[in-house]
Image: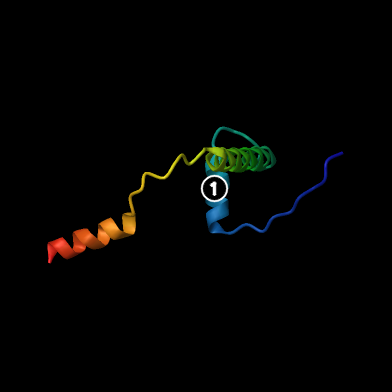
């Protein structure tokens, strides 16, 4: 038997539940589906962050970006 979860809803949550149950789903099914979808999104986002951090940065191109920005600002004066 699964554990029971109790939530305190507010007007925003009640509106979201109304949207999620428009298809005839029970509140319980809608909440379960929303939790599973939120977890899947969180896992995908974490996987994307890990993938980005594994991307090699390559070799520096020798350009000092801060110096270039400063030089451009001086030229605009």
* 58 versus 14 height, above or below: above
| Residue indicated by mark 1 | 16
| Label total for image | 1
Decide which of 73, 45 is in the foreground and name it: 73
The x, y position of residue 35, in whole percent, is 65, 43
- Residue 22 in the image: x percent, y percent? 54, 37
- Rendered-image quadrant of the N terminus: top right
Q: Residues within 10 Å of mark 1 (few under 14, many from 20)?
A: some
Q: Nearer the viewer, residue 16 or 67?
A: 67
- In the image, farthest residue toward the left: 77
* Residue beneath the point at 57% across and 52% down: 14
Is residue 63 rendered to the left or right of residue 4?
left
Pick out the residue farthest to the front. Answer: 62
In this rendering, would 66 be left or right of 27? left
The picture quadrant where one finds residue 41 is: top right
Relative side of 13 to 70, left or right: right
Q: Position of residue 55 (x, y in %)?
A: 52, 38
SS class of the residue under badge 1?
A: helix
Which residue lies most toward the top here? 23
Above or below for 74 versus 15: below
Q: Residue at x 12, y 67 (%)?
A: 77
* Colour setup of the view: rainbow
């Amino acid at each position: 038997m699964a554990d029971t979860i109790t939530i305190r809803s507010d007007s925003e949550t009640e509106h979201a539940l109304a949207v999620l149950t428009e298809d005839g789903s029970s509140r319980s099914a809608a909440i379960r589906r929303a939790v599973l979808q939120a977890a899947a999104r969180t896992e995908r986002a974490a996987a994307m962050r890990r993938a980005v951090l594994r991307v090699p940065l390559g070799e520096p191109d020798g350009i000092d970006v801060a110096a270039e920005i400063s030089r451009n600002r001086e030229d605009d004066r």
